[in-house]
Amino acid sequence: MIITKQKPLEEILRNIGPKPVFLVGCSQCATLCHTGGNDEVIALKEQLTSKNIPVSGHVVLDPACHRQNNKRILKDHVEELKKSEKILVLACGNGIQTIAGLFPEKQIIAGTDTLFLGEILHASEYQKRCVMCGECLLDLFGGLCPVSQCPKSMLNGPCGGSSHGACEINPQVECVWDRIIQHLKKQGKLHLLTVVQPPKNWSKAGEINRRI
Ligand code: SF4
Ligand code: SF4
């Protein structure tokens, strides 16, 4: 899931200004993150209205990153969209850009910051799992990703700074290398770590189009 957080209201207000705005949410990741689902869109609408900022309409797309589906859904909001030069999007950066592509004549306002691809650990608690490096190495590391979960993206063992299993960069977080070693030890596969990993080929993360 793509993890987002809503921007502070003051920042949103600064970017919107006093003129009418149309609000867009997303039924998928932003809904699960409580940053851009129906509840959050309605709550923001009420906050804006209470500050005398007109909201010309609102919609929760399904999902915001589906260009063709958006065109179909937004046909029902043509008149509301005409009344606003601005669209505020509560979705991930992907969804925001999809809307920007559909409405090049309008000012697009990002209502969220997009953080990472992550797992839902508990309600409202998310953990980074992947930075979409384009060449997955999880089979080498017991299913745990040092590229995304180690702040230094160490590929050949721990940096040496962890203390009692906690990361030296952020003691609130377990050292992923500590976990990798424990996992592989349990599986009897520690020998996997004797293979020296070359520097990651980041050109594989550079694909910008994919057609299936
Ligand atoms: S190795 Fe790359 S693709 Fe696999 S989980 Fe980590 S960042 Fe994602
Ligand atoms: S302590 Fe562990 S997770 Fe933190 S930077 Fe070092 S190797 Fe990476």
Image: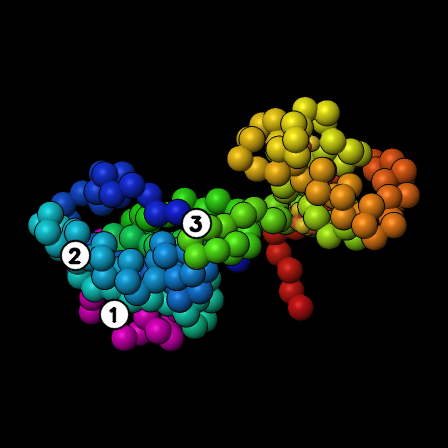
Residue pictured at 55% horizontal, 31% vertical: 170
Q: Is residue 97 magenta?
A: no
Amino acid residing under circle 2: Glu
Q: Earlier in the sequence, mark 1 or mark 2?
A: 2
Q: Earlier in the sequence, mark 2 or mark 3?
A: 3
Query: Which element is circle 3 on?
Result: strand
Rendered location of residue 62, percent (x, y): 41, 70
Residue pictured at 66% horizontal, 34% vertical: 165
Query: Ligand 2 sits in which quadrant?
Result: top right
Q: Which residue does the numbered mark 1 point to in the structure image?
A: 78
Q: Which mark is residue 46?
A: 2
Rendered location of residue 100, percent (x, y): 38, 54
Rendered location of residue 167, percent (x, y): 62, 31
Q: Is residue 99 visible?
A: no
Question: In the depicted view, which residue is nearer to us: 72 or 152?
Answer: 152
Farthest residue toward the top? 161
Q: Earlier in the sequence, mark 1 or mark 3?
A: 3
Range of magenta residues: 70-85
Question: In the depicted view, which residue is nearer to us: 146 or 115?
Answer: 146
Residue pictured at 28% horizontal, 62% vertical: 39
Q: Which residue does the numbered mark 3 point to in the structure image?
A: 4
Query: Which element is circle 1 on?
Result: helix
